[in-house]
Image (cartoon, rainbow, N blue to C red):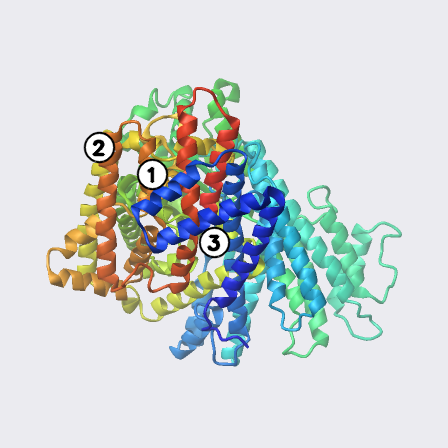
Amino acid sequence: MINVTDNNSLLRNDVKKLGNILGEILVHHGGISLFNKVETIREMTKNLRKDFSDENYKKLKDEISTLKPPVRKQVIRAFSIYFHLINIAEQNHRIRRRRQYQLQEDGVVQPISLESAVVSIKENNFSNEVIQKVLNDLSIELIITAHPTEATKRTVLEIQKRISTILQQFDHPLLTKKERRTLEESLFNEVTALWQTDELRQRKPTVLDEVKNGLYYFNETLFETLPDIHQELEAQLDQHFPEHKWKVPNFLHFGSWIGGDRDGNPNVTPEVTWETLKLQRQVALKKYEQSIVDLMKRFSQTTTRVELSDALLQSVEQDEQTYMDSGEEWPIKSELYRRKFAVMLKRLRHVGESKAGYQSAEELKNDLVLVRESAEQHQPSNRKLKTIRKLIRQVELFGFHLATLDIRNHSGEHETAVSEILKVVGIADNYASLPEEKKVAILEKVLSEPRPLLLLEEDYSKETQEIFKVFKMIKQAHKEFGRRSIEVYLVSMTQSPSDLLEVLVLAKEAGIYRLHADGKVESHLHVAPLLETIDDLVAGPKIMKTLFEMDVYRNHIKERGNHQEIMLGYSDGSKDGGTLTANWKLFKAQQEIHNMAKEFDIRLKFFHGRGGSLGRGGGPLNRSILSQPSETLGDGVKITEQGEVLSSRYLLEDIAYRNLEQAASALLEGSAKAHKNPLQGHARDKTWEDAMEQMSQASLKKYQSLVFQDEDFLKYFTQATPLNELGALNIGSRPMKRKGSERFEDLRAIPWVFAWTQSRQMIPAWYAAGTGLQSFADQSAENLALLQEMYKKWPFFQATINNLQMALMKADLTTAKEYIHLVKDKAIGERIFNNISQEYKQTKDILLRITGNQELLDHTPNIQESVHRRNPYVDPLNFLQVDLIQKMRESDEKSEELLTEVLLTISGVAAGLVNTG
């Protein structure tokens, strides 16, 4: 058995094996000259990292600049595909490490696992009642989005998945020589297919393309993995607390924005959203049909061998009379289970088509429970029928809607529609220009009256009618797909209470929110603010307090189970104020809103709009969860899973399981500790918070002095990054900018982060943090000691510092300096780059002092080695990218070939750095 503490030799063997295959393919497709060229550049970049000199640096640049088509494109592709292969090898090694833990003797528990969480709870002597209470309150929702940072095509992802499967098979201890030879041939063929596949999309994906890409993960991994997490937690509780009968609720769910996120995407129409819901239902029904066919094969028991329940017998006879035509019944009368499954299959196949189909997922679940209860009568009491129990859990988790679809739109869209309605019906001539107090008064009055406002639709503009259609579609979706299909309406750029009340008014007109004549309120949709900018985060507590004090809003909240969802935007906050300030304001907003809501007896769920990149709140799920104010963990956690995060976390079943297990175990253990000892759970030294406030202010001042006050900054950004070239990459249906505006404020955070990542400056992930930290540390030796204490004892600060380390590690200012050549005014390029360079050095120095590390990421050697392994081979792609962009921008004629090569470098850098957007 391989020890879990073994070094990464097996990983290095995998990388070498894949690299050798790629080398053979290069020789075959480009001759020995291509292979030698790639090897020369690879060795030069590797040696340059070991022993930097200006002379060697110039030689490398000269070597790269002499590349000409078609060899240049082949070299770019060679490095890009090498990164894809490294990614596969590292994923495989992560699976290997997990299996190594599972092979250990009893007593060896993998850290941050469901088992480790349950063991910790047991060691802390939690009562069964407390554990069950914590379980009942546990809630994790992960929301997949179509944010365009996944530069890898699905065809390529499928090849990568097959390569990973083959690599895993090499680890089988009883592999024969013949089997190994077959695997080697298969591996060579798949890597060859990877080389021969076009990695660039030829057109922008449509919204429905993105929907299908998202559904791929449900189909491949999530449908099976989610119930496995629940079953494993139940099994661990049964093992460690055998005296108690545990009930693990459905605490882990996936939702989606794809097909429902209208903010800035004119392609997301009500018709597209409706089609999305239909596609989601198709996936769920197909999965259930496959499972029931499988159960039909397994449940071959007959009434001549076992005694079945009377309830099941009556159900089968009644169902056959109601739903089956003559000759459709299962031919063997004694196989009662199969007769029942035959009826269930027919009803599944008619869902949404006729009354013969199931009208709700609850009906399907009831039938499955009837079968399970009967079948478990002839089983020992300690032996559960896991297959049918898993299917019941899947029906509970996914229903007929598969994933709850959030609808999101910009607050300005609602204000425009409401303003037009109020003008037409004679309530306000220019609602949009009114002060907030008058807006709120008008909206409260409208919501306090049972009668609707709307006149005939043709009296309204096309834009307002489109908004009406959205709310009518939601109403119809609740009827067709169930209310779980759409539960939340998110309001982007929420800046005042009226932004949420306007949505309630529109919901009222569609009948989703209703006030009856007798005063009874119906409300079938959560309305959630999205607090994005620094100012909005600061104003958030006041906005929500104003709403909670209104009778009309409280009545709505009461109908929603005294539950309020609040989304926090990591991307725009960071773009607005820098990462240190944004993280602190996000933390404070949660803390203050939670405490305020508690006074109103309202439960919150914070929805964290994180991206994959560090500049957008990225990082491991478990660390993201534990870095929140601990008092909020019991409220439940909702987090976006965006772009390339989907493939890195959910392409492979073992990796998907491990990511979800880490998230679940972190929340379970953190919630249990906070529940048992609330004071200890969220005690934070007041001096820590004061220090953060002081550092945040200094950091914000530094950040805004560059981004908002330097008149040349926007010119530097657009010229010293591949921002303008990103739009041609065809990786998303949504425009890069809101309303096609050229204003910095309207540039989306995703291209903002993606462009900086490509140029290796990565300033959204770290810039100005060093100034904030250093300014505080410089005041006294005690202050530095305080920061060191905060790093050791405060999960929020530790996560912040560790993410900064990762950002600096992935940034590379030697390479980034090449991008200055793209700035037309050299003085501007030099001046702003020197500013960035000085801040980088300061940030690195203070991070090392706070952590006590000799080098960045010393605390995570596996990640450190991974970054070291990749960085040398990203450099050539960056050098080529600068050279090609310069050629393209200086050319009077548009060159498709040059653009293709630029896009290949962008795709390659994204694969090399992994978390890019």
How far is the residue under mark 1 from the one under mark 3?
42 Å
Residue 345 position, x and y percent, is 75, 53
Say left or right for 396 vs 557: right
Identify the residue under disc 3.
Answer: 141
The residue lying toward the viewer, choosing from 182 and 332, is 182
Question: At label 2, which amino acid type do we have?
Answer: Asp
Query: Residue at the location (64% across, 51% down)?
Result: 190
**Label 3 residue SS:** strand
Quadrant in the picture for residue 383: bottom right
Say left or right for 167 vs 784: right
**Label 1 residue SS:** helix
Does label 2 or label 3 sit earlier along the sequence? 3
Would residue 477 be visible to someone looking at this image?
no
Identify the residue under disc 2.
Answer: 710
How far is the residue under mark 2 from the one under mark 3?
40 Å
Does label 2 or label 1 sit earlier along the sequence? 2
Residue 671 position, x and y percent, is 39, 65
The residue lying toward the viewer, choosing from 229 and 490, is 229
Identify the residue under disc 1.
Answer: 818
